[in-house]
């Protein structure tokens, strides 16, 4: 072996290589490469936000009424341009666009992609971790590519993932029925290289961490209030960790254990997070990493997020996601209130 060869991986498991080896689908390789490329561009913009004067508002609001930051608009354009021109997409849905984006027929392919281009962007001006979330569906047989191809439950989602922009740029994704894998961007070669194989929740539940915006606590239902209080009680109370960027909070929850809650409440009866590009992709990743992705009480019963069918592209849902140990605490509080809840 040459003297310096040990310092370099001469057989790196890159993103393209992994997707091809696991799916043998060249269109899916093109899609994940396009998402990866747009996320490289977003990562560069995020890292240069200060010197490039990209902080602050863009003067618009997005599809769900949130103020758009300059980086929201730029990240959205980067995602749309990459996906429209990759040749394998037919319909795109973005948090930043009120209407779906139909890809021109000359560039259209079989995939429908929903995405949040810059999750947690309200934190961008104070340099807190942000991310990108995406879900992928295949066009229905006989369809020419329209919004109905995306208005389906998570059972039809073929790929889900997120990218976090922090001390590393890391893409985590899974294919339907598969394991969850992590790839870090190696800036020296400009490629995503596999760094985490078969990501799983800690078997014992992991660290005792709860993550919730307790500023909304007064509007929660009683079982959620009681569950959070029980996390804080006892000889070894849970630690509170809430970043406010879903990507960062979910990534930590998978790696360390614990529970993430953004339940429905008296103010937001349908929940706050968007189903197509936040709820479904994160639920698919959580479940395939061995966790539980529940709605808590929603529309009169406790449901799996993956079972929900969006009635429009920006439909919302509540979220209770975490390991079995901690989600069971929430379920037990619902049972005590006379509500039917699973035993995990």
Image (tube, rainbow, N blue to C red):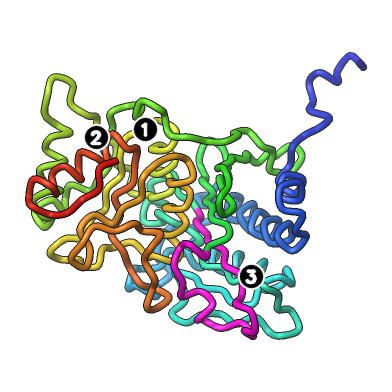
- Above or below, 146 against 304 in this view is below
**Residue at coordinates 74% horizontally, 79% vertically from top-left?**
107
Measure how far apart labels 2 and 3 are at the Cα level.
39 Å
Residue depth check, mark 1 versus mark 2: number of the one nearer the observer: 1
Instruction: Give the residue pinned by disc 2.
Output: 240
- Above or below, 328 against 132 in this view is above
**Residue at coordinates 75% horizontally, 49% vertically from top-left?**
16
**Callout 1: helix, strand or loop?**
loop
Instruction: Give the residue pinned by disc 1.
Output: 257
- Label 3 crowding class (10 Å Cα cut-off): few <14, some 14-19, many 20+? many
Q: Nearer the viewer, residue 175 or 46?
A: 175
What x and y, as percent, mark residue 242?
Answer: 29, 42
Q: Left or right: 166 with respect to 329?
A: right
Q: In the image, which residues are magenta?
A: 132-156
> Can residue 317 be seen by looking at this rendering?
yes
Measure how far apart labels 3 and 1 are at the Cα level.
33 Å
- Label 2 crowding class (10 Å Cα cut-off): few <14, some 14-19, many 20+? some
What x and y, as percent, mark residue 327?
Answer: 27, 41
Instruction: Give the residue pinned by disc 3.
Output: 111
What x and y, as percent, mark residue 214?
Answer: 18, 47
């Amino acid at each position: 072996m040459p003297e310096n060869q040990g310092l370099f991986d001469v057989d790196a498991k890159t993103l393209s290589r992994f997707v091809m080896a696991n799916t043998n689908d060249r269109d899916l390789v093109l899609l994940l490469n396009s998402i990866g490329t747009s996320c490289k561009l977003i990562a560069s913009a995020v890292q240069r936000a200060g010197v490039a004067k990209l902080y602050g508002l863009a003067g618009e609001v997005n599809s769900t009424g949130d103020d758009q930051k300059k980086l929201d608009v730029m990240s959205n354009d980067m995602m749309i341009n990459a996906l429209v021109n990759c040749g394998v997409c037919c319909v795109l849905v973005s948090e930043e666009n009120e209407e779906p984006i139909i890809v021109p027929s000359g560039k259209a392919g079989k995939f429908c992609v929903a995405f949040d281009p810059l999750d947690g962007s309200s934190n961008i001006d104070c340099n807190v971790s942000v991310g990108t979330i995406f879900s992928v569906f295949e066009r229905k047989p006989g369809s020419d590519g329209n919004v109905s191809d995306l208005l389906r439950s998570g059972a039809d989602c073929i790929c889900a993932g997120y990218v976090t922009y922090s001390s590393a740029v890391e893409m985590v994704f899974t294919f339907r029925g598969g394991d969850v894998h992590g790839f870090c961007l190696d800036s020296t070669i400009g490629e995503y290289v596999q760094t985490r194989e078969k990501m799983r929740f800690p078997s014992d539940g992991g660290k005792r961490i709860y993550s919730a915006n307790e500023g909304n606590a007064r509007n929660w239902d009683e079982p959620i209030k009681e569950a959070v209080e029980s996390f804080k009680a006892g000889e070894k109370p849970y630690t509170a960790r809430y970043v406010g960027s879903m990507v960062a909070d979910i990534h930590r929850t998978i790696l360390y254990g614990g529970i993430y809650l953004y339940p429905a409440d008296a103010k937001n009866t349908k929940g706050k997070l968007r189903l197509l590009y936040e709820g479904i992709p994160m639920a698919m990743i959580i479940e395939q990493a061995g966790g539980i992705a529940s709605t808590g009480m929603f529309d009169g019963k406790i449901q799996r997020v993956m079972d929900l069918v969006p009635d429009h592209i920006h439909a919302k849902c509540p979220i209770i996601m975490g390991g079995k140990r901690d989600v069971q605490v929430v379920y037990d509080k619902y049972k005590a209130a006379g509500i039917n809840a699973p035993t995990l």
